[in-house]
Image (tube, helix red, strand yellow):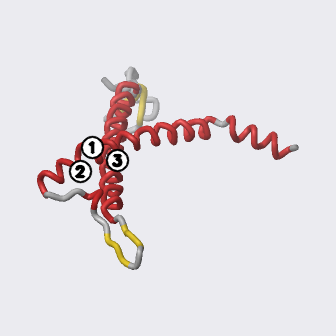
C-alpha cells in the first residue's frame, strides 16, 4: 500500500498537472495548425505551384504510399515549431522585462579610501585602517 500512497503523491505534484494541461492544450493547438495547413496553406501552394500534397502517392504491388500526407505532416510540424518558437521567445521577453523591473539597484554603501585603498563606509570621514581624513 506504500506504492499507492507514493502514486497519489506523484499525481498530486504540480509538474504532473502542468504536463497534463500542456498535453491537452497541445492537442487542441495541433488541430488548429492542421486546419491552417490543410485548409489555407496547402490550397495556396496548390494555386502557386499547381501541387496538392494530399493527392500525392505511389502505388506498387497493391500497396499505396501516401507521401503527400507525409509532406503535409512535415509542413504541420514546421509551422507548429515556428509558432511555438515565437511564442516561447515572446514569453521569455515578457519574463525578462518583469525581472528587470524586479531587480533593485543596490545602493552603494561603501567607498574606497584614497590613501590606503581600503573599503570604508560611504559616510565615513576618517579611514579606520590608516586614520586619514577622507571626504
**Image position, residue 52 (x, y; %):** 22, 56
Question: Residue 21 or 74: which is nearer the viewer?
Answer: 74
**Image position, residue 117 (x, y; %):** 36, 39
Describe the element under mark 1 as helix, strand or loop: helix
Q: Does residue 116 appear in this view? A: no
Most extreme residue toward the right, as rendered? 1
Q: Which residue is mark 2?
A: 42
Residue displayed at 13% across by 57% down: 49
Numbered tag placed on residue 79 in the rendering: none
Q: Which residue is mark 1?
A: 39
Q: Which residue is mark 3?
A: 80
Describe the element under mark 2 as helix, strand or loop: helix
Residue displayed at 45% across by 41% down: 26
Q: Say which quadrant the C terminus sits in.
A: top left
Cβ atoms at labels 3 and 2 below 8 Å apart: no
Describe the element under mark 3 as helix, strand or loop: helix
Question: Residue 108 or 21: which is nearer the viewer?
Answer: 21
Cβ atoms at labels 2 and 1 below 8 Å apart: yes
Q: CA distance from mark 2 to mark 1?
A: 7 Å
Horizontal relation, residue 3 to residue 58: left or right: right
Residue 7 occupies which quadrant of the picture? top right
Amino acid at each position: 500500500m506504500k506504492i499507492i500512497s507514493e502514486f497519489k503523491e506523484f499525481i498530486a505534484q504540480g509538474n504532473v498537472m502542468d504536463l497534463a494541461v500542456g498535453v491537452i492544450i497541445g492537442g487542441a493547438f495541433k488541430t488548429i495548425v492542421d486546419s491552417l495547413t490543410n485548409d489555407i496553406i496547402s490550397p495556396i501552394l496548390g494555386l502557386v505551384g499547381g501541387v496538392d500534397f494530399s493527392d500525392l502517392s505511389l502505388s506498387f504491388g497493391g500497396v499505396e504510399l501516401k507521401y503527400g500526407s507525409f509532406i503535409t505532416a512535415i509542413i504541420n510540424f514546421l509551422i507548429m515549431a515556428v509558432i511555438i518558437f515565437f511564442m516561447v521567445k515572446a514569453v521569455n521577453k515578457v519574463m525578462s522585462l518583469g525581472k528587470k523591473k524586479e531587480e533593485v539597484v543596490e545602493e552603494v554603501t561603501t567607498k574606497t579610501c584614497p590613501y590606503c585603498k581600503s573599503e570604508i563606509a560611504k559616510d565615513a570621514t576618517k579611514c579606520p585602517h590608516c586614520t586619514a581624513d577622507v571626504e
